[in-house]
Image (cartoon, rainbow, N blue to C red):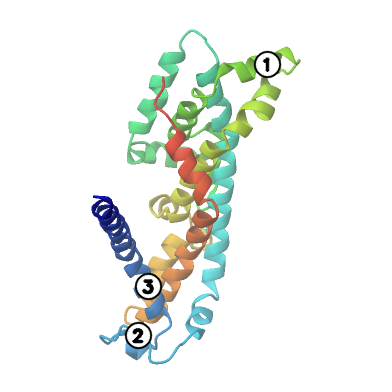
Amino acid sequence: MRSGGRTRRALMWVAVHATAVAVALMFLAPLVFIALTAVMSDRQALSADLWPREWHFGNFVDVFSGDMVQWTINSTVYAGLSTVFMLVSSVPVAYALARFRFRGRNVALVVVISAMMLPPQVTMVPLYIVWARLDLTGTLWPLIIPQLFGDAFSIFLLRQFLVTIPREYADAARVDGCGEFRTMVRVILPMAKPALAAVALFQFFYCWNDYFRPLVYADPDHWTLAIGVATFRAAHEVEWNLTMAATLLTILPVLIVFFLAQRVFIQGVTLTGVKG
């Protein structure tokens, strides 16, 4: 009986981990293919070979020059400032909806949820007219400045996390003489680091991969990597090695940021409850 139980547990362990390995390989296979193609010669990239005969790391040097540098700077500025502005504006709103009791709080929450359901294409034309009258079209500012007014999804996600923090912590801080702002900054937000990291990564990834809105507002001098890589691919249709190198350089910062913050990101997503 004991040997049968051990055998059963061993088989279960193999089955669980084999499935996880198979799923991991399924998701990693496209990335490995991109990386291998990126270091091939242009002639081999058009063949059926999966392994490079010669390693052409100079492809990355050829790609990351000229406009690619400016596109990377534009994407970094767009994603970085949008993330910072979103946190500065969304955190106080989420804190108020989670911790304060005031008339109309539920109505305000419904408005936030409704804003999440509104497609961006609906407001694109009137917003473009507003930014055109402010003479800001042709730049990335029409995409960055609105983050100072909060993001509905981030507000909702943060609010759902903040309501799970016991009120006793805030009450103890007030007894010690902390005001509401200091309580939020020194007591509540340090406990909400996983949720802050989650919404920050969501915002950063969205802006880094955003194609539609920069295409509408930005001129070629302010194009981001999403637009730039699409333009690069159109200019190098048969040079798949260069196209894959450009693609790898585009997704590499996202992978690095995710793996550095993977633990706190997953913790923030899993701990965000639905308590209302």
User: Residue at 60% of width from left, 35% of height from top?
Assistant: 88
Callout in the foreground (3, 1): 1
Which numbered marker is on residue 51? 2
Q: Mark 1 belongs to which amino acid? A: Ala
Q: Mark 2 belongs to which amino acid? A: Trp
Q: How far apart are marks 3 and 1 (CA)?
A: 52 Å
Q: Which of marks 2 and 1 is nearer the N terminus?
A: 2
On the image, which quarter does residue 134 sit in?
top right
The image shows residue 153, relative to residue 219, as above or below, that is above
Q: Earlier in the sequence, mark 3 or mark 1?
A: 3
Q: Earlier in the sequence, mark 2 or mark 3?
A: 3
- Residue most extreme to the front: 1
Closer to the camera in the image, 66 or 133: 66
The residue that mark 1 highlights is 172
Which numbered marker is on residue 32? 3
Q: Quadrant of the C terminus?
A: top left
User: Residue at 56% of width from left, 56% of height from top?
Assistant: 76
On the image, which quarter does residue 116 sit in?
top left
User: Residue at 29% of width from left, 54% of height from top?
Assistant: 6
Q: Mark 3 belongs to which amino acid? A: Val
Which numbered marker is on residue 11? none
Answer whether residue 173 is visible to the viewer in this image.
Answer: yes
Q: Could you say whether the residue bearing mark 2 is in a helix, strand or loop?
A: loop
Answer whether residue 137 is visible to the viewer in this image.
Answer: no
